[in-house]
Image: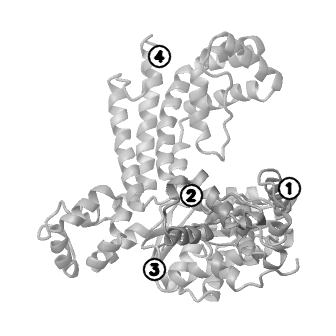
Amino acid sequence: MPMCLLCQKVFTNDAMKPSKMKDHLERVHPDKKNKDVEFFKVLKEKIRNQPNLKSFFKAPGTVDYEGGLKASYTISLNIAKKAQSYTIGEIVIPAIKEVIETVMKKDSEPVLKCIPLSAKTVQRRIDEMASDVEKTLVLELQHCKFSIQLDESAFGCSNVLMVYVRYYSQSLKCIVDEFLFANYLMGDAKGETIFRSLEDYLKEHNVPLRNITAVATDGAPAMVGRYTGFATLLKETVPDVRAVHCVLHRHHLVAKNLSGELHAALKVCIKAVNKIKGQPLNSRLFATLCEKNDETFNQLLFHTEVRWLSRGDCLQRLVDLYHSTVEFLADVDQTLCEEMKKCKNHLFYLADLYSKFNEIQKRLQGKDVTIIQARTLLIGFQAKIGLFKSFLARRDFKYFSNLQKLEEGADVSDRDLEIYINHLEKLEEDFKIRFEDLESMTVPDWIIAPFDIETGNANIEFSLQEEHVEMSADLEAKLLFKHKSLSEFWSNVNITNKYPKLSAAAQPFLLAFPSSYLVEAGFSHVNAILSKQRNRLNLEMRGDLRLKLTNFQPNINALAAAHQTHPSH
């Protein structure tokens, strides 16, 4: 059909007459009537190359099956990232159909027929992408040093071992934390079984066990046992490996250390919370009372032993709603009400202290935390305890905001202060014992502050001195250090290329995990994946967990190119 190149209006065949075409040009586009033929040829080529709806909705014989295959992989990847079941793909198809037909006013069949998304197809796509990601990871681990963190947990009748790695990626040119594997443990969950599971996986993928430089575990006997613990067995094979007891677990054990009076007060507080929160009627009546009293909150928070941050949050909320809590308990449980009044000072002290514990816990959690950062935080907090103790000794409550409110009414007795100071002294001693390895760990000054020390006065190995002198005069490196974290600086491609010996010597301190946080977070995702509808999913055989936790992107183009375009499914 004839069409005007300027306004793209389509005419009937009768309009092909030169007179009619000239009439349209002069009447509608008078400013273009004197343009030469080349102008219209260029315009025609531009219009021909413009994308249009027809390019997306080809005839049945020319459907873009390759694009549909890539879309199938991408949608399957999103399903895995959201930890959804495979059947979600079958729901996506009607949604695509509705969008095409309702919004675009087009026939959806040519598009839908080239995007296979049945449950079996989605499962295959996820497994293929997970395998691709795993190959990328193990190829890098075969030729580099790395640290690991691992833990095992029970899911139903099975024990699952999960392992994360941290290493310098040659492809990404940075230090990365990456999920390695999750395997079911056959039989028991002893240290030897855990070690064999890791050893078998690394052998299967041709990754040398000696490439492991450090390992972080919890304090369970299966992990740190003197004779048959996992760390002991690993050291027999890799003698130089650094074994780190998870700092989060150790910090939690310190936080649990309470005197008899404080422990009794904590039990009373938890009992009061359970009395109100544990009964729906009491919870509703308490919420009404809080609204009547114009409180900021209208609900207390439960304390759960396995959720380590919950104790501080629970106590602080109880402090915020203390007067409403006592008023409510006076009507429902007079004995508990009197106990709450007696332990008021202890409650306010514990709320202050556990808020500080929670702050440290949060800073120790997350990705990219190094053992150097963990050491700085924990040794610094240990020093703070001495500071808190000295301030309390002279009745200065600047570091205890809740106690400070009480002191305004002179409610804190000398006996209470003695209890708190003694408790802080025991905490300080416990910190020294539990974190003795971190306190005694020597971190070279040139790693932490490479531009603030002189090579001649610093304890720098002879083989590193020449590079350090050169780096000290490098203004670009100095500027980079100001704007990057330690890990980012020492793994920066410019630094590793210009100062390979220094960066290699710094890596063991940057690669070591200080905790098993990533594994614990990974187990939370396992709970989400193994829903009631998917409780028979095999985590070891299927790729769902890997795609959920990985930082790598699968090579969808390569997978699609090597695949039959439109298999039956």
- Residue under the image location 37 percent in, 51 percent down: 379
| Mark 2, other Cα within 10 Å: few <14 / some 14–19 / many ≥20 | many
Q: Which residue is mark 2?
A: 517
Dot 1 or dot 2: first in sequence order is 2
Q: Which residue is mark 4?
A: 406
Say what secondary structure mark 2 lies in.
helix
Does residue 412 appear in this view? no
| Mark 4, other Cα within 10 Å: few <14 / some 14–19 / many ≥20 | some
Residue 201 in the image, given as x and y percentages of width and height: 64, 82
Say what secondary structure mark 3 lies in.
loop
Q: Is residue 456 left or right of residue 443?
A: left
Q: Which mark is residue 532?
A: 1
Say what secondary structure mark 4 lies in.
helix
Vertical position of residue 499 compared to residue 430: above or below: below
- Residue under the image location 70 percent in, 19 percent down: 336
Q: Quadrant of residue 46?
A: bottom right
Q: Residue 98 versus residue 36: which sits nearer the camera?
A: 36
Dot 4 or dot 3: first in sequence order is 3
**What amino acid is labelled 1 in the image?**
Lys
- Residue under the image location 62 percent in, 61 percent down: 22
Q: Which mark is residue 145?
A: 3
| Mark 1, other Cα within 10 Å: few <14 / some 14–19 / many ≥20 | few
Residue 271 in the image, given as x and y percentages of width and height: 70, 28
Q: CA distance from mark 2 to mark 4?
A: 37 Å
